[in-house]
Image (spheres, helix red, strand yellow):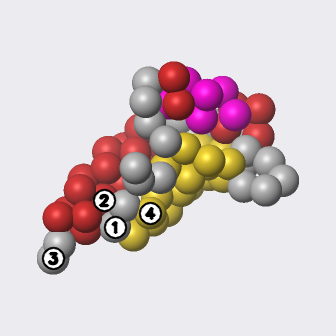
Amino acid sequence: MGAGCAKGDYIISRLKAIAAQYPQIYESITGRGLLIGMHFKDAAVGYKVAAGLFKRGVLVAGTLTSAHTVRIERR
């Protein structure tokens, strides 16, 4: 198992724990390695989360049409 897989597994497990606490906000957390997607029930919330993460230096991107799904990207 590479370092990316171990880091991704850690991040995904933490995000899934957060999503479980807020089922009204999160649809699901998906990913493999460091390719991680956060799926929101409301695109406006996804946009706010993405903007907050970006302000903290986390590279994120929405999908082409909305922020229902936000990808965490690697630099």
For badge 3, the amino acid type reads Met
Query: How far is disc 1 from disc 4 in space, using C-alphas?
Result: 6 Å
Residue on which the image places disc 1: 33
Identify the element where label 2 is drawn: helix
Percent coordinates x, y for residue 56 in the rendering = 44, 24
Query: How far is disc 2 from disc 3 in space, using C-alphas?
Result: 11 Å
Q: Residues within 10 Å of mark 1 (few under 14, many from 20)?
A: some
Q: Is residue 9 magenta?
A: no
Q: Do residues under tags 1 and 3 come within 8 Å of each other at their CB atoms?
A: no
Q: Earlier in the sequence, mark 4 or mark 2?
A: 2
- Residue occupying image coordinates x 43% and y 30%: 57
Q: Do residues under tags 1 and 2 come within 8 Å of each other at their CB atoms?
A: yes
**Region in magenta:** 47-53
Residue on which the image places disc 3: 1
For badge 1, the amino acid type reads Gly
Q: Do residues under tags 1 and 4 come within 8 Å of each other at their CB atoms?
A: yes
Q: Nearer the viewer, residue 52 or 21?
A: 52
**Numbered circle sitting on residue 35:** 4
Magenta part, dominant SS: helix
Residue on which the image places disc 2: 8
Q: Residue furthest bottom?
A: 1
Q: Earlier in the sequence, mark 2 or mark 3?
A: 3
Query: How far is disc 4 from disc 3 in space, using C-alphas?
Result: 15 Å
Q: Earlier in the sequence, mark 1 or mark 2?
A: 2
Q: Earlier in the sequence, mark 4 or mark 3?
A: 3
- Residue occupying image coordinates x 17% and y 72%: 2
Q: Do residues under tags 2 and 3 come within 8 Å of each other at their CB atoms?
A: no
